[in-house]
Amino acid sequence: MSIKSTYSWLSGFLALGVCLAALPVEASRPFEEEERSRRALFLRPAMESPEAQLAYAQQLRENGRLRRAQRQFRALVRTWPRTDEAAIAQKQFAQVLSERGRHRRALEEFERLETEYPGRYPHALVLDELFELANALRTERRGQWLFLPGYTRPERAVPFLERIVKTGPRWERVAEAKLALAELQEEIGEPEMAILIYERLERRHPGRDEAITAAFRRAHLLNEISERYPRHVDGMEIAYIALGLAVQRYPRDERADQARLEMQRLQSRMAQAAYEKATFYDIRMRNPQAAIITYERFLANFPTAEQVPQVRYRLAALQAKMENSDG
C-alpha cells in the first residue's frame, strides 16, 4: 500500500470518528437506561394523587390482589417519595412482600423504611413490625395438603431477629428478641451460637426473666455438648460451673432442681474421667509417680465418689512400693 493510499484511509477513519462524536447524546446512552425507562412505565401510579393512590393500593391488598398491590405501593413511593403517604406505602410494600413469601426482599424494604423515613415512621415501630413478622415465620406451616401436616422453616426468621438485635440495643423488647433468636438457633441445630447469645443476654439484661431463662438454657446446652465428648474434661468443668452459677444466682427458680440433678450426673462423669486417667498412668503406663499424683488429686476433688475405695487401695500400694524401692 502506497503512502498516499494509507493517508487517504486514515483521513476517512478520522472523519468517521468525527461524525460519530457529533451524534446526539441520547444515541450514546447505554442500553440499561432504556430498560429502566421501560420498567418505569409499569410503576406509574394508577391515581392522580398520593391520597387516592394509597387508598387504591390498600383496596387491592384487602381484595387479595397482592402482586398488583405491591406494584401500586411501590409506584406511590417512587412518584411521591416525600409525602406522608409514601411512608405508609413503604411499610405496606414491605408487608405485602412478606405476605407473598419474599422475606429477604421484605427485610430490605423494612430497612429502607427505617433509613428513608426516620421521622415519619419511628425506629421502634419498625422493630415491632420485624418482631411480629419473625414470630410468624417461626411457626408458619407450609406444604399443607389434605391429610399432610406440612412443615415449618423457622430459620427464615433468623435474619429478622438478627436485624432487631443489631439495630435496637435499647428497644424495650430487645431481651425478648435475643431470647427468641437463641431459642431459634437451638431449634435449627446451632447450639454453639445459641450459647453465645444466651451468655450475652444474661450479661446485658441481668435480673430480667429472659436473662434467667438464658442462664439455665446456656448451662443445659453446655452440659449436652459435654455429653457428646465424654473425655473432654475442660468441657465438663465449664458445664459444671455454668450449672452451679445458675443455681447460685436463681436458687428458687423452678429449673434449679433439674440443674442440681444435672450437676450430680456431671460430677459422676467427671469423677469417672479422672479415675480412668489415674488408672491409665498406673496400669497402662506403669508410671507410679504420675499415678500417685493423679490418685491424690482424685481424692481431693471427688472425696465422695464411688471409686474412692479403689483409689485409696491403689494409692497405698503405690506409696508402699515407692518407699521400698527407695529403701
Image (cartoon, rainbow, N blue to C red):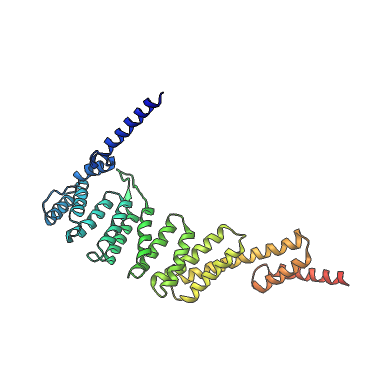
Instruction: Name the residue at 68% across, 62% down.
Output: 276
Q: Is residue 254 visible?
A: no
Is 305 situated left or right of 66 in this image?
A: right
Name which quarter of the figure residue 213 lies in.
bottom left
Residue found farthest to the front: 4
Is 320 situated left or right of 235 in this image?
A: right
Instruction: Name the residue at 46% across, 55% down.
Output: 189
- Nearer to me, 223 or 173: 173
Quadrant of the drawing holding the N terminus: top left
- Nearer to me, 102 or 246: 102
Placement of 215 over or under 116, stated as above or below: below
Residue found farthest to the right: 327
Residue found farthest to the top: 1
- Measuring from the top left, give residue 69's x and y in whole percent: 19, 49
Quadrant of the drawing holding the C terminus: bottom right
- Nearer to me, 66 or 266: 66
Placement of 274 over or under 187, stated as above or below: below
Q: Can residue 60 be seen in this view?
A: yes
Name which quarter of the figure residue 295 lies in.
bottom right
* Count of number-bearing discs: 0
- Measuring from the top left, give residue 15's x and y in whole percent: 30, 33
- Measuring from the top left, give residue 107's x and y in whole percent: 31, 55
- Measuring from the top left, give residue 269's x and y in whole percent: 60, 64
Name which quarter of the figure residue 7 lies in.
top left
- Nearer to me, 318 or 87: 87
Placement of 70 over or under 327, stated as above or below: above
Instruction: Name the residue at 29% across, 53% down.
Output: 106
